[in-house]
Amino acid sequence: MIPLTMVGVLTIVFFVLRLSGDPVYLFTTQESTPEEIEMLREELGFNKPLPIQYIRYLRRAVVLDFGTSLRYGEPAINLILARWPATLQLAVCALLVSIAIGLPFGAISALKRGTIWDTICSTITLIGQGAPVFWIGIMLILIFSVRLRLLPATGSGTLKHLILPSITLGAFFAARVARISRTSILEVMQKKYIVTARAIGTKELRVLYLHVLKNAAIAIVTIIGLSIPSLIGGAVMAESIFNWPGVAGFMVNAVYNRDYPVVQAGIFILSFTVAVTNLVVDVLYTYLDPQIRLGSQKV
Amino acid sequence: MKRTIILLLFSLLLIVVVGYGSVFADGGNKTEASEGISQEITLMVTNLPTSIDPLQDTGLSALTAYSLLYDRLIDIDKSGNTIPSLALSWKPIKPTVWRLELRQGVFFHNGERFNAKTVQSVIMRALHGTESRQKAQISLIKDVQIVNDYAIDIITSEPWSLLPNRLSRLWIYPTEYFNQVGLEGFLKKPIGSGSYRFVKWQQDNYLILEKNDKYWREQQSEIKKITLRHTPDMNARINALESGEADMAFIIDPEQIVRLEKLGYKTLNQPLGQAYIYFFRTTLKSPVADVRVRRAINYAIDVDTIIKSLFLGMASKLEGQPVGSDAFGYDSSIKAYPYDPQMAKKLLAEAGYPQGFTIAFDGTSGMAPKDKEVAELIADQLAQIGIHMQINLNERGVYLEKMMNAKMSPIWSISLNYAPTMDLFGPMNNATSFTGHKSHSDPAFDSLYLRWLAAFDQKEQLKIGREMLKYYHDEALALFLWQSPGLYSISPKVQGIEMNPDYTINLLNAVVK
């Protein structure tokens, strides 16, 4: 399925980008003559008919050649791959933050259902879910960078630089993880095998770890898996606020500049990551629930 | 097995989290890097060059970095005059030949000597190199001949009086070194002759430079190390300044400037070499084809009030011409149309529009400072004399496509660039029939323009230039507004930084206190 998905994505990106207009004009000056514009069009390869451009594009994409960036004059795939680790680093850290915050909050909320702890955790979760990423980012910068001068507001390179962007991006997903964890744990706790385990005198901690959390994990892993594309999407905002040198902000600028090769290479890499992530999540299911077998229904 | 899988996954995450730290270490973390070094500054720039090869980025925002690392043959002063840099003098010896005498005793950062051969190779690559984006700017150059080690003749395909100004776009690098290491090697370690030499850079992230102690100019900067950080988002630039990570933030909104001033930050207000005007398409059948209507619009707009309300007084008004006083050829005798709504109504009535009319406008949102708000205010002021301007805001690509294909509405906005050459070429060329947008077409003006291009005598060039500016003003070819604001916020501990209208930077008097 992954190769088919990739061809579909590449095709959509190719045609949608062309709908946005002629990129040649972005490389002209106010004084450019029609002859100069035509020369530039030929130089950039946009003078050929669209179907020919499309076939050439697909043929090159097979070997990861998306052409040369119109703006930077360098192979587009190299530009994307150079920035990809920074985005991946941010997304993974944000994911870890969201799990580290969301999972305990969800568990506490479920296990202490109806108590003050449940209310506190649910309220914090609600704030996390409701507050926009940019607002959280700005608030963190104001407190920790501008006022306290403890952490850098922009840039990258050290673990200190990672803290604020990761929390900003992770906060929203932490709320999502907490909500799903709570619901899922509550659902599992109603199951008869939990009642049985308790009835035969199994210790509460053992019930929680061995039976509740493991069975609730499928829903949690699913939501984490599904969050990865959103995390990368959310990175656009975080990268912009914290001036993080990743691929998300870079691609937004490429769209703005109609730098087709860069957009195509970027979307290819992002789609591939999402497809692979989904595959990993599917594989994880089999580990979490032995009843699930890849390629068949539950037996 | 389960433990192995978990361990593997955990290790993978750990590698991702910490593993790339070194790859993206920007060295620009001031708090860590600056310990013990006093003369070090960090500048939050809007954009770094897309390439460190000076022939590949022709954008204005690239010039801050280029002006530190490289020198050009000819510099431009703040009044738009050409002044010597690596070229000591220049004169036309024939209508199509310019002779340049070059400076002796200049060495690049790697010790390579600057000479006539260097200039010849740079110009030839700028003209014919596959990566060069300078071709259109110097396309009239046919050949470069070496007269001796420190003199060259530049041969043009037709008489070209503006060559010295055009050469201000060309930054010089050591060509022997370039030929030796190739483009790839040069991009890894660029060499110039500028006041600062290359230390490290990462595209769209940072550029670190250190002082060139052997710089050829007598006056030297106190600043030992500079970090330029690519920060397209204004708020991120401000945050870095306020958190102490940076010493200067480029291009800040007036409202933020006021706030930062209250916190003790200094402001540098250096308008850019860009005239923000609303062009009238006199070539279309519309009310603005009539000069009386165009003048009426100029009388109807209270530019001072707009500058005061939207830019808090921090923009430089255009005096009835499409350049500021920083351009060579600026005419101080031409004055802006005064705000006079009664005169505007009178002119409209004379033109046959006593009740006004409805007219379309093509503008942008986010391409020029407060362009959307400006359009709304202008529409509001025009409504007061009966002109109903229908605002159409375009995405950047669509706007450029319309402009180059002569599809703009009768009124359209433009930031008319005259930097870095700081001459009348751009604004005048845009009023001829030779442009793609075809806003104005008058054979008399075209011929004046061609005479101006061919005028080698500076007095004659100034005289024709003034005639053209007077025509621009009297014919009211545009609604003249202001120069694009260039507002910079600087930490109180840094003094003496100067910016130029073309984004080049001067640190010769800069010092960290």
Image: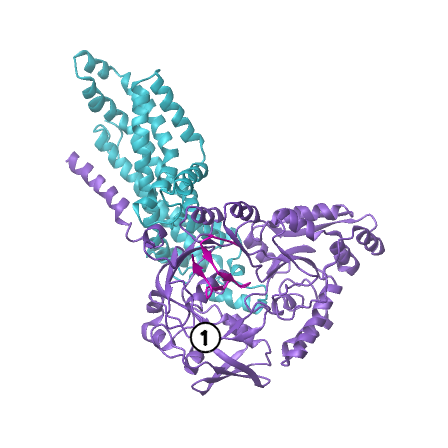
Where disc 1 sits, the SS reads helix
Bounds of the magenta segment? B487-513
- Relative depth, front residue between B300 and B336: B336
> From the image, which quarter does the C terminus of chain B lie in?
bottom left
Q: Residue furthest left?
A: B1
- Say if residue B388 shows up in the picture: no
Quarter of image, res A186: top left
Report the chain shown in cyan: A
Report how many numbered discs are placed on residues in the image.
Answer: 1
Q: Is residue B407 left or right of residue A105?
A: right
- Relative depth, front residue between B386 and B246: B246
Q: Is residue A224 left or right of residue B68?
A: left
Q: Residue at x 40, y 62 (%)?
A: B223
Report the chain shown in purple: B
Question: Measured along the vertical axis of the image, is residue A95 above or below residue B248?
Answer: above
- Say if residue A194 shows up in the picture: yes
